[in-house]
Image (cartoon, rainbow, N blue to C red):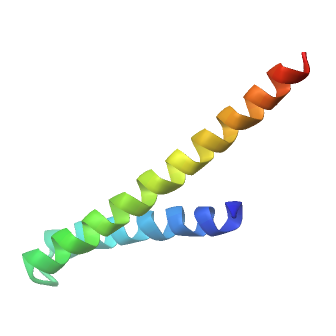
């Protein structure tokens, strides 16, 4: 699951960067750029949320042992 999330996060970063350059140089219509950038941001936020929750649950399990 972590590898899938990591790939999704990296894909999100690439999509957001591509959307930024597409808007900057007018490669695509603005609607497509906004949609692509938003999807990239959603992937980035989802990956960060997964890793933070994974880190928190790992920490809680270690505290229960003590």
Q: Residue at x 59, y 69 (%)?
A: 7
Instruction: Name the quadrant containing residue 25.
Output: bottom left
Which is nearer the eye, 43 or 27? 43
Q: Is residue 2 left or right of residue 20?
A: right
Can you say which quadrant of the picture contains the C terminus? Answer: top right
| Residue positioned most to the top | 66
Q: How far from the left and from the top, in percent, is residue 16?
A: 33, 65
Q: Residue at x 60, y 63 (%)?
A: 5
Q: Is residue 50 above or below residue 60?
A: below
Q: How far from the left and from the top, in percent, is residue 33?
A: 18, 74
| Residue positioned most to the bottom | 28
Can you say which quadrant of the picture contains the N terminus? Answer: bottom right
Instruction: Name the quadrant containing residue 39.
Output: bottom left
Q: Residue at x 26, y 64 (%)?
A: 38
Q: Is residue 48 above or below residue 63?
A: below
Which is nearer the eye, 62 or 33? 62
Q: Residue at x 47, y 55 (%)?
A: 46
Instruction: Name the quadrant containing residue 21.
Output: bottom left
Q: How far from the left and from the top, in percent, is residue 42?
A: 36, 59
Which is nearer the eye, 50 or 19? 50
Q: How far from the left and from the top, in percent, is residue 26?
A: 11, 78
* Number of marks drawn: 0
| Residue positioned most to the right | 65
Q: Is residue 38 left or right of residue 23?
A: right
Q: Is residue 35 left or right of residue 43?
A: left
């Amino acid at each position: 699951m972590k590898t899938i999330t990591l790939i999704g996060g990296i894909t999100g970063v690439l999509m957001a960067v591509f959307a930024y350059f597409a808007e900057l140089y007018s490669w695509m219509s603005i609607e497509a750029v906004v949609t692509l950038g938003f999807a990239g941001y959603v992937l980035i936020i989802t990956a960060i949320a997964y890793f933070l929750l994974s880190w928190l649950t790992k920490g809680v399990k270690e505290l229960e042992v003590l």
